[in-house]
RNA sequence: GCCCGGGUGGCGGAAUGGCAGACGCGGUGGAUUCAAAAUCCACUGUCCGAAAGGGCGUGCGGGUUCGAAUCCCGCCCCGGGCACCA
C-alpha cells in the first residue's frame, strides 16, 4: 500500500546482533557479489566455435541448455515488480541447470523498436535512439540488481546496427524464396525462375513466362515470394497513422495498441506469405511442450477446416436474358459437410461476392414468394439485391455479427443446379455468408446446419433430411422417426447415417458421415464437379508500417513500380535522419493516403545505384518493418551476437538450438509466437537453422496483480500514496475505492523493485515472487507478504552463521531426524526445480530451516546442502554463506546435492489408522513391519478400539508403512 | 454456442487415489523492551466440548472405491479465447 506501511528494518538498532541478516547486510552482500560475478564473467557460456568459444573445452562434455525469456521493451518508466517474475523463474532454472552439469545459455536482450520511444521523440524532439539507449542502460542496471545471471556479451537489442542487418538479411531470404507446394517447403526463388525458363513449370496465372517483359516477370514473381507486395484491403488506423496486421486488431475493430478505430482500406503493402505454412504451423504444435491453451489459440487462429469445394452450375433459365449470361459459369462453394450435398436446397452468396452482379436476373420468376423479394417487396431482382447489398455495406461487422440476429437475404431471381441430383435450386444473397471465408458462397443444407435452418424457416425454403438423426436426438426433441425435417425444432447437426443420398453414379445411403464424405469427394472429383479442399482463417501477415522507429526495408523501387531487393552486401540499410518523427495522423474519416515519415528524408528517399544494368535512380521503400520483425529470430542473435553475415555460425546454431525453455506472457500466443515459428520454419527450409521449431518448451508466467484505487470520478490514483484508515482507503484526504488489477502504469499501482530491494534485498524479492504461487498463475502482490520470505532468509542465515561473530557455527552432529529431513528436502527440491515448481521448493526449504532452528545440530554436509539448495533462488546470500563456510570458488557451478535414498529410511514410522475411512488414531511401528503386526498394533490403539467395539471386522486394508483402514460394522 | 483454464480457511496457496489445509501473510496470546520497531515462542478451518474426543468440511447433485479435493457422470459459477468460419 503506502510506502509508510512497509516496515523497513535496515536500521539495525544498537542492541541487534552485529551480523544479523538485515536489509543493510543484504544490500552489501548483493552489491559485492554482483560486482564479483561481473568481474569473473561467471555467467558467460562458451560457444563451440568462433569468438565466444574460449573455455568450451572445459564444458564440452556437458549437456547444453538454452533458457530464454521473452525479451522486454525497454520502456522509459522502468521495471515494476511484475516484470521480472518470468526473468527470475528462468534465472533459477538456469542456475539449477548449471549446478546439474549443463552449459547454459541465458541472457537478456531488448525489443527496442516501437511506438513509445517514437511517441516520446515526437513530444521531446529527442532522437528515439538516444532515449532507447538510455532506457536499455537503466534496464540492464535494474536487471543486474536482481542478480540475474545473464551472459552480458550476448545481450543484444533489435535496434543495434548488426541486429538490423540480421533482420534485413532474413527479409531478403524471404523475399528471395517461394513456397514449393509439391515439396511443401520454401525454396530459393532462383529455382522457380529456372523451372519457368525451361517451361518445367507454368505460371499459376496462365501467362507464358517466356513471353513476359522483365517488369512483368518481376510482377509475376511477387505472387510467389514469401515476402511480397500486394494491393489489398488492409487494416488502416488513422490515429496511429499506420496499417496493422490482423493479429493487432481486436474483434471490435480497434487497434490492440491504443484502442483506436481501425478501417479496411485498399492499400499496397508488404505481406508475408504465412498462409503457406498454415498446415505445418498447426501440425507441428503436436511436437511441442507448450501450454494446451496456447496451442489451442494457435490452432484456432489458423482455423483449418477440411471439406470440399463444389461447383454449382447456373441453371439456364428462360427468365434470364442478357449479356451476363456468357460470364455466368458456376458458383464455387466450400463445405465441411459434402456428405449432406443431396440435402442442399439453395445457394447463398455473400453481398460482397464478386459474382453478385452477374447473378441478378432481369425479372422475378413467376410465383416468386414475397419473402424472397426483400423488405421493400422490390419490383425487380436488381432493386432487391442492390438495396440489400447497400444496406449490408453500411453495417459494421459488429452489427452484422450481432448475436441472435435474424437471418435475412434476397433472391437473385436465378437458380443453380445441385450437381448430385440435378435439382434446380434458388440462389440468394445473404449477409450471414462471409465474403472472406471459404469461397464467399455456400450451399445451404437447412436440415443439417443451424444457420441454414434459420434462413430456410425465415424465407420458407424446403428442408430435406439426408442424415438420419440419432434416436437420442429425436426423443430429446419429442420427435418420431418419421417426423419431416421441416417440423424439427432445429437442424440435426451431429453425425448420423446418410439417407436419400443417391443418384445413378453414387450412393451414400447407409454410410456414416466420415465415410460418406470420402465417397462423395471421390465421386465429385471423378465428375470434375468438385474436390476435397482445406480452407483456413489465417490470412497473410501485413508486414509494413508507416512509422519511423523500425527497420527500413532493403528494397528499392524502379521506374516501373516494381520492388527490387538490394544485395546482402549493402546491408544494413540504416534509418535516415529526419526532422520530424511523427507518423501522419489523420482524422478517422480522412481518406488521405498516409505519408510515411521516411518520405521526409529528402536526401535519402531517392538513391542512385547500379544494380547490374547501369546506374539509375531508384525510389527507396519508405515503410518500415513492424515491431514483430526484430523478435522473430532474436534467439539466433543470442547464439552469435556479433556475426555480421547470414544467420550465424552453423556449428553454434546446431549446438544450442532449439530453445529448451521459453518463458513469457500469454499475450503473445498468436502474435510473436506464430510469426516467430513461421520465420523459423522458412529459415529451416532454406537450410539456415537445424530444427523445425524454435521453442521446445513454453511456460506462460502469470500476471502480478496489485490493489488499485479509483477516486469519485473513477480515475485511478497513485496506489503508493493511498493510506488505509479506519474509514477505509483514503487518497489526498478523499475516500477511494479499492480494486485489484494487473500491475502497471495504467492502473497506477506499480511497485518499484528498487524500493523493495533497498528494504529487503534482492534475494527476498526473488523468493517472494516465486513463493506467491505456481509460476503460471496470477498472483496478487502485497508489501506485507515479502516479510515472510525476508524472515526466512534471516533464519536461514542464523542456521549457519553466528549473528554475533559473523562466523559459521561450529558444526555439530545432527539428529537422525535432521539428517533424514535434509535428504528428504534434497529429493523434493530437486524434483520441484526440474518441474518448475519454485513455490513448493521454497516451502520445503522453509520447513527444513524451521526444523534446524528448533532442533539445532547441523553438520558441514547438511549446512552445505542447504546453501546449495537455496543458491538458484537466493544466489547472493548463498554465495556469501558458501564463502563463509570456507569455499573459494563460486557456488554457481558447485554440484547440486544428491540425496541418499538410504537416508530417507527411518526406524519407526507413524501409521494412520482409519475405521471406515475416518482417521481414528495413529500407531508407531518399526519400518517395514509386517501386515499382521501392523494390524495388531492398529486394533490395540485405544481410540480405534473404542470405534470398533461391538462391531464385526469385515475387512482390514493395509498399505505397509502408510495406512490401515478397518472396515467394521 | 464452441474451445482452454479454474473453483480448497480471513488471504496467497499445498496435497493428483491413502493423515485436507504444507509453507507464507494476516489474526490472537506470550517473551524481550521504559516503550515501540525488529526478533523469538505458542495457538489459529468450522461447530459442540473444561478436556479427552466428536460432528461438519475442498462450488452443487449423483456414482466408482475399504478409502475421493483428486477418478467417472450430470449441473452451477468464475477467468481467458473464438464466434453466422459453412
Image (spheres, coloured by chain):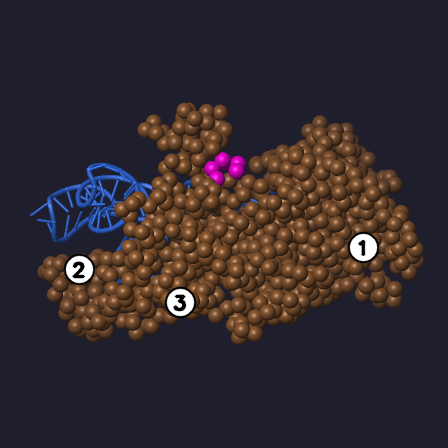
Q: Which residue is painted at 42% across and 52% down in the image?
A: A28
Location of mark 3 (residue): A887
CA gap, disc 1 to disc 3?
A: 59 Å
Of marks 1 and 3, the one in the foreground: 3
Query: For this rendering, which residue is in front, A684 or B1?
Result: A684
Chain letter matching colour brown:
A
Q: Which mark is residue A565?
A: 1
Instruction: Tell whether A616 sits left or right of A451.
Output: right
Using the image, determine if residue A82 lies above or below residue A195.
above
The quarter of the image holding the N terminus of chain A is top left
Answer whether labels 3 and 2 touch (C-beta < 8 Å): no
For the residue labelled by badge 2, is the local secondary structure a helix, a strand or a loop?
Answer: strand
Of marks 3 and 2, the one in the foreground: 3
Instruction: Tell whether A132 sits left or right of A933.
Output: right
Residue A47 at x, y percent in the picture: 60, 68
Using the image, determine if residue A309 lies above or below residue A262.
below
The hue of chain B in the figure is blue
Amino acid at each position: 500500500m503506502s510506502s509508510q506501511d512497509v516496515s523497513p528494518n535496515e536500521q539495525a538498532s544498537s542492541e541487534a546482533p552485529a551480523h544479523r541478516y538485515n536489509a543493510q547486510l543484504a544490500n552489501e552482500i548483493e552489491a559485492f557479489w554482483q560486482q564479483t560475478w561481473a568481474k569473473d564473467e561467471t555467467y558467460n557460456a562458451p560457444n563451440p566455435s568462433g569468438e565466444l568459444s574460449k573455455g568450451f573445452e572445459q564444458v564440452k562434455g556437458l549437456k547444453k541448455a538454452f533458457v530464454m525469456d521473452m525479451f522486454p521493451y525497454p520502456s522509459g518508466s522502468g521495471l515494476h515488480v511484475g516484470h521480472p517474475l518470468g526473468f527470475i523463474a528462468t534465472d533459477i532454472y538456469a542456475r539449477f541447470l548449471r549446478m546439474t552439469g549443463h552449459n547454459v545459455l541465458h541472457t537478456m536482450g531488448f525489443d527496442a523498436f516501437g511506438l513509445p520511444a517514437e511517441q516520446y521523440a515526437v513530444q521531446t524532439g529527442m532522437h528515439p535512439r538516444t532515449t532507447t539507449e538510455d532506457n536499455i542502460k537503466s534496464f540492464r542496471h535494474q536487471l543486474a540488481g536482481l542478480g540475474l545471471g545473464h551472459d552480458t556479451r550476448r545481450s543484444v537489442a533489435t535496434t543495434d546496427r548488426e541486429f538490423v542487418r540480421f533482420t534485413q538479411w532474413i527479409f531478403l531470404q524471404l523475399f528471395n524464396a517461394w513456397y514449393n507446394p509439391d515439396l511443401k517447403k520454401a525454396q530459393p526463388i532462383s529455382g522457380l525462375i529456372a523451372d519457368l525458363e525451361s517451361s518445367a513449370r507454368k505460371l499459376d496465372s496462365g501467362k507464358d513466362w517466356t513471353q513476359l517483359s522483365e517488369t512483368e516477370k518481376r510482377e509475376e514473381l511477387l505472387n510467389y515470394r514469401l515476402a511480397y507486395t500486394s494491393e489489398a484491403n488492409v487494416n488502416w488506423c488513422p490515429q496511429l497513422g499506420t496499417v496493422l496486421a490482423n493479429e493487432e486488431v481486436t474483434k471490435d475493430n480497434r487497434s490492440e495498441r491504443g484502442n483506436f478505430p481501425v478501417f479496411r482500406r485498399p492499400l499496397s503493402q508488404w505481406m508475408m506469405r504465412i498462409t503457406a505454412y498454415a498446415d505445418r504451423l498447426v501440425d507441428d504444435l503436436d511436437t511441442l511442450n507448450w501450454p494446451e491453451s496456447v496451442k489451442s489459440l494457435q490452432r484456432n487462429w489458423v482455423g483449418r477446416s477440411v471439406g470440399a469445394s463444389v461447383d454449382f452450375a447456373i441453371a439456364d433459365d428462360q427468365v434470364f436474358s442478357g449479356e451476363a449470361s456468357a460470364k455466368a459459369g458456376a458458383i464455387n462453394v466450400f463445405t465441411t459437410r459434402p456428405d449432406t450435398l443431396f440435402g442442399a436446397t439453395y445457394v447463398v452468396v455473400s453481398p460482397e461476392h464478386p459474382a453478385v452482379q452477374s447473378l441478378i436476373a432481369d425479372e422475378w420468376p413467376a410465383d416468386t414468394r414475397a419473402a424472397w423479394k426483400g423488405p421493400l417487396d422490390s419490383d425487380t431482382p436488381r432493386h432487391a439485391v442492390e438495396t440489400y447489398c447497400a444496406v449490408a455495406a453500411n453495417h459494421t461487422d459488429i452489427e452484422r455479427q450481432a448475436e441472435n440476429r435474424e437471418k435475412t437475404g434476397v433472391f437473385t431471381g436465378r437458380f443453380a443446379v445441385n450437381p448430385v441430383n440435378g435439382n434446380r435450386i434458388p440462389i440468394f444473397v445473404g449477409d450471414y455468408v462471409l465474403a472472406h471465408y471459404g469461397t464467399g458462397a455456400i450451399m445451404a443444407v437447412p436440415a443439417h446446419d443451424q444457420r441454414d435452418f434459420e434462413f430456410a424457416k425465415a424465407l420458407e425454403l424446403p428442408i430435406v433430411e439426408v442424415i438420419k438423426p440419432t434416436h437420442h436426438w429425436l426423443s430429446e426433441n419429442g420427435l418420431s422417426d418419421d417426423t419431416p425435417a421441416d417440423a424439427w425444432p432445429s437442424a440435426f447437426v451431429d453425425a448420423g447415417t446418410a439417407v436419400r443420398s443417391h443418384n445413378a453414379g453414387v450412393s451414400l445411403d447407409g454410410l456414416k458421415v466420415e465415410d460418406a464424405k470420402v465417397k462423395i469427394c471421390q465421386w465429385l472429383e471423378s465428375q470434375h464437379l468438385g474436390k476435397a479442399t482445406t480452407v483456413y482463417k489465417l490470412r497473410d501477415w501485413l508486414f509494413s508500417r508507416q512509422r519511423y522507429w523500425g527497420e527500413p526495408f532493403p528494397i528499392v523501387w524502379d521506374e516501373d513500380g516494381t520492388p527490387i531487393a538490394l544485395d546482402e552486401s549493402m546491408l544494413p540499410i540504416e534509418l535516415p535522419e529526419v526532422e520530424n518523427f511523427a507518423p501522419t495522423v489523420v482524422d478517422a474519416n480522412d481518406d488521405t493516403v498516409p505519408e510515411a515519415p521516411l518520405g521526409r528524408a529528402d536526401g535519402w528517399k531517392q538513391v542512385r545505384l547500379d544494380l547490374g544494368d547501369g546506374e539509375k535512380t531508384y525510389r527507396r521503400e519508405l515503410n518500415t518493418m513492424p515491431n514483430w520483425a526484430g523478435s522473430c529470430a532474436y534467439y539466433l542473435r543470442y547464439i552469435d551476437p556479433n556475426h555480421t553475415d547470414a544467420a550465424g555460425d552453423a556449428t553454434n546454431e546446431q549446438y544450442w538450438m532449439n530453445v529448451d525453455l521459453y518463458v513469457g506472457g500469454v499475450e503473445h500466443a498468436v502474435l510473436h509466437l506464430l510469426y516467430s515459428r513461421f520465420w523459423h520454419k522458412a529459415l529451416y527450409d532454406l537450410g539456415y537453422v537445424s530444427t523445425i521449431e524454435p521453442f521446445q518448451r513454453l511456460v506462460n508466467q502469470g500476471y502480478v496483480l496489485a490493489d488499485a484505487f479509483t477516486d469519485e470520478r473513477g480515475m485511478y490514483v497513485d496506489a503508493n500514496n493511498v493510506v488505509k484508515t479506519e474509514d477505509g482507503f483514503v487518497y489526498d484526504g478523499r475516500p477511494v475505492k479499492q480494486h485489484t488489477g494487473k500491475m502497471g502504469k495504467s492502473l497506477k499501482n506499480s511497485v518499484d523493485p528498487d524500493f523493495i530491494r533497498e528494504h529487503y534485498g534482492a534475494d527476498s524479492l526473488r523468493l517472494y515472487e516465486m513463493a506467491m504461487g505456481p509460476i503460471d498463475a496470477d498472483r496478487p502482490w502485497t508489501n506485507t507478504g515479502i516479510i515472510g520470505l525476508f524472515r526466512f532468509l534471516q533464519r536461514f542465515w542464523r542456521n549457519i552463521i553466528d549473528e554475533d561473530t559473523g562466523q559459521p557455527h561450529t558444526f555439530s552432529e545432527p539428529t537422525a531426524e535432521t539428517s533424514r529431513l535434509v535428504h528428504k528436502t534434497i529429493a523434493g527440491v530437486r524434483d520441484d526445480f526440474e518441474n518448475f515448481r519454485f513455490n513448493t521448493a521454497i516451502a520445503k526449504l522453509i520447513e527444513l530451516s524451521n526444523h534446524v532452528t528448533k532442533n539445532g545440530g547441523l553438520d558441514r554436509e547438511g549446512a552445505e546442502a542447504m546453501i546449495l539448495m537455496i543458491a538458484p533462488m537466493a544466489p547472493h546470500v548463498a554465495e556469501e554463506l558458501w564463502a563463509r563456510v570456507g569455499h573459494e570458488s563460486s557456488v554457481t557451478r558447485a554440484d547440486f546435492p544428491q540425496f541418499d535414498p538410504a537416508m530417507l529410511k527411518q526406524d519407526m514410522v507413524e501409521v494412520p489408522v482409519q475405521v471406515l475411512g475416518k482417521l481414528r488414531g495413529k500407531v508407531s511401528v518399526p519400518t517395514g513391519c509386517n501386515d499382521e503386526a501392523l494390524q495388531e498394533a492398529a486394533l490395540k490403539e485405544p481410540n480405534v478400539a473404542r470405534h470398533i467395539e461391538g462391531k464385526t471386522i469385515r475387512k482390514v486394508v493395509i498399505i505397509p508403512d502408510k495406512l490401515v483402514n478397518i472396515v467394521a460394522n
